[in-house]
Amino acid sequence: MVRASGILMPVASLPNRYGIGCFSKEAYEFVDFLENAGQSYWQMLPLGQTGYGDSPYQSFSTYAGNPYFIDLDKLIDAGFIEKKELAKIDFGKNPDEIDYEKIYLNRFRVLKKAYDNSPYASEPKHPWNGEKYDEEREAFERFISDNAWWLKDYCLYSAIKEAQGAVSYIEWDDDIRTRKPDAMKKYEQELSDEIRFYEFQQYEFALQWSALKKYANERNIKIIGDIPIYVAFDSADTWSNPELFKFDKKGYPTVVAGCPPDGFSATGQLWGNPIYDWEYHKKTGYEWWIRRIEHCFKLYDVLRIDHFRGFDEYYEIPYGSETAMHGEWVKGPGYELFKVMKENLGDKEVIAEDLGFLTPSVLKLVKKTGYPGMKVLQFAFDSREESDYLPYNYGRNCVVYTGTHDNQTSKGWYKSAGRKDKSFARRYMCVRSPEDAAYDMIRTVLSSVADTAIIPMQDYLNLGDEARINTPSTLGGNWIWRMDKDALTNELSEKIRLLSRTYGRIIKKKETPEIKGRKKYR
């Protein structure tokens, strides 16, 4: 194992003049910042298209990329749109926040104009219809063919959804909701141009993301991706593969996902995602899961699997419940899924998000996979009891954070902590003032024995809860934080590099960072 560190930074939170972070020059500058700061990892939130509540964990597809991340300047450079056209569009006035309503209303309109004025349109205009662009069209058609196994359903689903006024697929007419052959053929013909537009979006996303990832990898920066354990109910995944889930004969869920009451919520978290029919998955040799994970490793170098304990036991709530208080725990697929995954894909680098209350069986599963679990320093300072999150309880094979996207920022946490918890934290980390608390938490994480340490960007910037990414079980005000365009200074990168060097987390060029269990512990 190589001792290393990285930064958690959502792509959407990067600065950009078009209202939301994307694969623009600011993303490349962030990679440069990571390299200069001696970091080895860029951890992101899921790159899928955001759906309900603007959450990246509620996506319309487990495979499709978020069209919001397409860099519009690259479309200008390609000649598909003109810069002066974008100057007239309101993508949001506040540079500190993402205005998802304005992004939704305007981003697709711009992308449609770019599609219509490109060589990829159904009927390209001059000059895009010339032989000069045959090679580009051939590459586009190869992309469509190579990804047809998921792209076809996603693009048809998206085109129908748009035509139906964006309502959930469960509200569509029965013939297309249940994918009757005649209805499928009808919509494919009627919406052929709209379908091709969605194919164009995914092609541009793939091209731009591939270039950015290559740039990062060439600078010894590995990408840590994030995959939700569940898919959204209103998604191309559920519409095209209902047999994968616990649905009734009419296509409605019988149970949905969530978690019971805990420190985040007194009534639990009602996520609403459909629950997998694990017996069906087992009969197919977990084919869908193998393909899903394989796709993720084409996008990322390391994969963080959210809510890992759901593979051991998952919490299911009767469909229609208003809270998560009346659910029950049900046994999941356990190690068998990961055994099959390793047999098919090899020993991939995975981080198990194993936070929360962990039963002996969950701990046994994580240990058996060999995957590193997660430690969050903010959870360590409960003055009522000794915590597994205190650094002296860590093993090497784990990934430690000051906090995650679901936590307060470190500055915000220290400010709002109870008197006894704050006193304990102050003694443990030698905090001299509230302004130094985030720095002291960072230093404590980096100095721990954990092989991998990941710090949210907001903590390096010493920001308060105005920069919090998400508050679980709440709607509104989440996923909107954006970093200031002048935040990435040379002074800050030097400070991070010094900290990383002090605690032995800068990797030499010839070494390759890895996040995986050590074989001798398996």
Image (tube, rainbow, N blue to C red):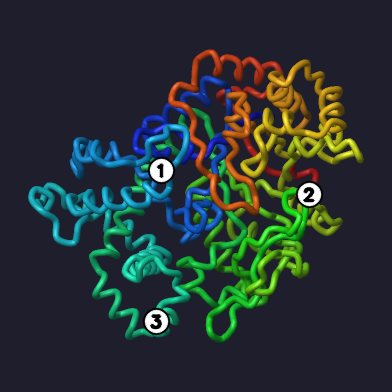
Mark 1 / mark 3, whichever is N-terminal: 3
In-image side of 182 versus 132 (left or right): right
Instruction: Report which quarter residue 338 is drawn in.
Output: bottom right
Image location (x, y in percent) of residue 425: 82, 28
Distance, label 1 to label 3, CA atoms, is 36 Å
Query: Which amino acid type is shown beneath numbered disc 1?
Result: Trp
Of residues 10 and 520, the one drawn nearer to the viewer in this rendering: 10
Characterize the local packing of mark 2: few (<14), some (14-19) or many (20 or more) Cα atoms within 10 angstroms. few
Distance, label 3 to label 2, CA atoms, is 51 Å
Determine the secondary structure under disc 3. Answer: loop
Return the mark for residue 129.
Answer: none
- Residue drawn at (74%, 33%), measured in percent from left and top? 416
In-image side of 380 versus 242 (left or right): right
364 w.r.t. 244: above or below: above
121 w.r.t. 415: above or below: below
In-image side of 459 versus 56 (left or right): right
Where does label 2 land, which residue?
Answer: 522
Query: Which amino acid type is shown beneath numbered disc 2?
Result: Arg
Of residues 265 and 149, the one drawn nearer to the viewer in this rendering: 265
In-image side of 284 versus 269 (left or right): left
Of residues 423 and 116, the one drawn nearer to the viewer in this rendering: 423
Image location (x, y in percent) of residue 385: 91, 40
Where does label 3 land, which residue?
Answer: 173
Mark 3 / mark 2, whichever is N-terminal: 3
Instruction: Report which quarter residue 321 is drawn in.
Output: bottom right
